[in-house]
Image (cartoon, rainbow, N blue to C red):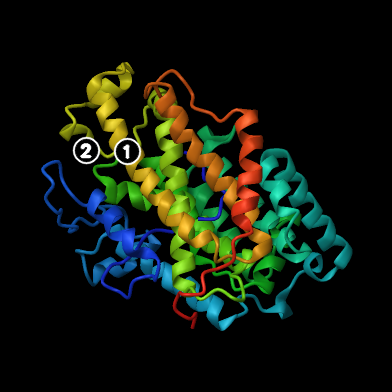
Amino acid sequence: MSAVFLWVVSPKETGRSRCPWSSSSSSVMNFIGRDGGGRRRNWVRCLNYSSGFSVLSSAVANPYRSSEEMVYDVVLKQAALVKDQRRLLDSGTSSEAMTNPTLLNEAYDRCGEVCAEYAKTFYLGTLLMTPQRQRAVWAIYVWCRRTDELVDGPNASHITPMALDRWEKRLNDLFEGRPYDMYDAALADTVSKFPVDIQPFKDMIEGMRLDLRKSRYMNFDELYLYCYYVAGTVGLMSVPVMGIAPDSKASTECVYNAALALGIANQLTNILRDVGEDARRGRIYLPQDELARSGLSEDDIFKGKVTEKWRNFMKGQIKRARMFFDEAEKGVTELNAASRWPVWASLLLYRQILDAIEANDYNNFTKRAYVGKVKKLASLPMAYARALVRPSKSLELRT
């Protein structure tokens, strides 16, 4: 599945202080945490993956933590970096590409060209940002795209776990000021200027590793972690660059949580849109236990027939994705004013894919849900209007 480069966290209220706007977060957790009979499920299942999974390291101490709880630990760490404004790269180890202004400008320009070619709407939105933020977002976008293409690109069939290990080694070198090429140099410069931590980047690589060896997900807890790896991580990477509005009263953790919610929502939308395409590749990115409770099997997915059981199942999946979009909306306003428009545009456009699935009578086996150009253009003024809304004045002070 493709990683989504959009501002993205999740409604995470795992026994910690709640975000001031997240009174509805419990509805999301109640929805995804109940079995078919409406009983609250016990989130006691930790994933049976290899010990290399970075966000699962703390599970050794407590094997009963849900994926959401473990991801939230990463969120807290990233939020702390923003508060402290720590530098993650020692400028003394910078390569020539990072110290030569001409080469560095060329590196950022190349990143901008890639973003303009493959993410046109998002690229136009970035032009509203300050030049420094604009270039930093381009650099992050290019790294995410290159990472995603390792398993989804034209050479994906030749990618091995060793290749991903080499890519992670390259990432470590990049964060230590030793970029391998011009694109790396742009990102290395970015992480030296913004409080961006390496962990989300490593976690995205873990998502690529997961795609190499896993094609089924037993429950939503497993699927949530996958969505975090390939999309939620982007929010943790990009929030420090996009910035939080100076007059926002929301806590840094809450803004990150809203960012992660958008990433989860986007990836769930991707999954629901691409059911047929994924099935033809032998993959099913749907919770197996929920399929079973709906009276559906893998054979039903591979046959690709729209039945009443399938429609009912899809209604529940779409409802969950919309809940995450609802959570994400509450945090967009807290972003820096220059960053809100592209984020709102991305959110509104992606949310409409769910509407398109419904319009196709839930046939995501042979029909691809998409948003037409007219609807896309109509969404931009609406996104701009929402971007003008100032941050809430009633939220708790950021620390």
Marks 1 & 2, CB-CB < 8 Å contact: yes
Query: From the viewer's perspective, is 50 left or right of 113?
Result: left
Question: Looking at the image, which residue is at 74% across and 56% down?
Answer: 128
The residue nearer to you, when weighing 126 against 60, is: 126
Check disc 2 and report the residue beneath it: 290
Whole-percent x, y for residue 172 in the image: 57, 65
Residue 218 in the image, given as x and y percentages of width and height = 24, 42
Q: Residue 288, located in which quarter of the rendered image?
A: top left
Q: Identify residue for label 1.
A: 317
Position of residue 40 in the picture relative to residue 355 (left or right): left
Distance from label 1 to label 2 (Cα)?
A: 9 Å
Mark 1 nearby-residue class (10 Å; few <14, some 14–19, many ≥20): many
> Residue at left 44%, top 39%?
269
- At a point 74% along the width and 43% down the height, the residue shown is 116
Nearest to the observer: residue 93 or residue 276: 276
Residue nearest the viewer, comparing 131 with 280: 131
Task: Indicate the secondary structure of the residue bearing disc 1.
Answer: helix
Seen in the picture, residue 272 relative to 210 is either above or below; the reply is above
At label 1, which amino acid type do we have?
Answer: Gln
